Image: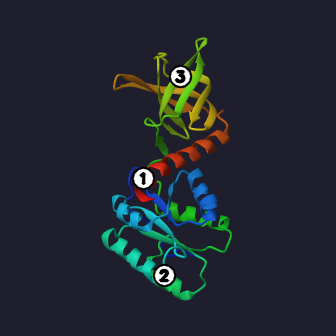
Amino acid sequence: MDSKNVPQDSNSIESGKKIFFLYPTAPIMNQIITELIQHEYEAYVAKNHTRLARVIKKFPDSIIYVNVDENMPINEWETWINDILTVTPSIKFGFFSSSIDGEVRKKLNNNISCGFFHLKLDMNQYITTILEVLELMNAKGKRKYLRACTEKEINAVINMPFGGDFLNGTIKDISVVGTSCVFKHDPELSKNSLLKDIQLRLQSILLKVEAVIFGSREVLGEKLYVMLYTQRTDPDVRVKIRKYIQMNLQHKMDLEIN
């Protein structure tokens, strides 16, 4: 493995770069991608190289990690990569392979911007290197946290005790630091109010948090409240929120690339 000639990306955007893992093995998904999500990187699994090649033009600052052992021989991978770079030269590539054939590495060598990793070794040992590469690439851009829009989700709801009753509402978006929501009946919560025993239901995931009202505003005739979780929120809750965000984003991306 090495990560040769890693460049600084001067064209990073506000929302950061999308990182695609094309035909990842189970260890790549369970170890590397899982860890990247916990570091707030926007990582996706891609299982169709033809569709990815069409869609990637919409995300010209993306990074693609390709498992070149899958789907087609190395000569065809070389053509596929060159075709993408002809149309979208700003795309950066990294590669996974179990081959020890120097010819495989040689064919990819000119396009290795984000590392070449051996599939037969423990993926955990590559995580630090990949995180270093992504930091050099400014893959997060200016954002600090991933956020999922949930306003069209049926099972993204919030409820909490308030004034001797229970408030029920809909989560509009969520990140690891907070959420925005609207309630069926406006409780007229004031800024900096401390709210305890909040339950967030994200599909089948049920979480309990404590939060402070950061502010509110009118949106399409509804009052949207923005809450920030307190430091007393269980760290395991944040891990689960990141996992949910990744599933949410992956589901939406699947409609385009898989």
For marks 1 and 3, give the CA distance: 31 Å
Give the image location of residue 33, x and y in percent: 58, 58
Check disc 2 and report the residue beneath it.
74
Q: Are marks 2 and 3 in contact (CB under 8 Å)?
A: no
Amino acid identity at mark 1: Leu
User: Residue 96 occupies which quadrant of the picture?
Assistant: bottom right
Residue 66 visible in the displayed image: yes
Q: Are marks 1 and 3 in contact (CB under 8 Å)?
A: no
User: Which element is circle 2 on?
Assistant: helix
For marks 2 and 3, give the CA distance: 55 Å
Q: Earlier in the sequence, mark 1 or mark 3?
A: 3
| Label number found at residue 4 | none
Q: Residue furthest left?
A: 87
Q: Residues within 10 Å of mark 1 (few under 14, many from 20)?
A: few
Q: Nearer the viewer, residue 9 or 241?
A: 241
Residue 35 sits above or below residue 68 on the image: above
Amino acid identity at mark 2: Ile
Q: Earlier in the sequence, mark 2 or mark 3?
A: 2
Please report the residue visible at 35 percent of the width from the left and 74 percent of the height from the top. Answer: 83
Give the image location of residue 158, x and y in percent: 55, 28
Q: Is residue 142 left or right of residue 101?
A: left
User: Which element is circle 1 on?
Assistant: helix
Check disc 3 and report the residue beneath it.
168
Residue 1 sits above or below residue 39 on the image: below
Q: Residue furthest top?
A: 164
Give the image location of residue 17, x and y in percent: 43, 57
| Label number found at residue 255 | 1
Q: Nearer the viewer, mark 1 or mark 2?
A: 1
Residue 10 sits above or below residue 101 on the image: above
Amino acid identity at mark 3: Asn
Q: Nearer the viewer, residue 114 or 172?
A: 172
Q: Nearer the viewer, residue 142 or 105?
A: 105
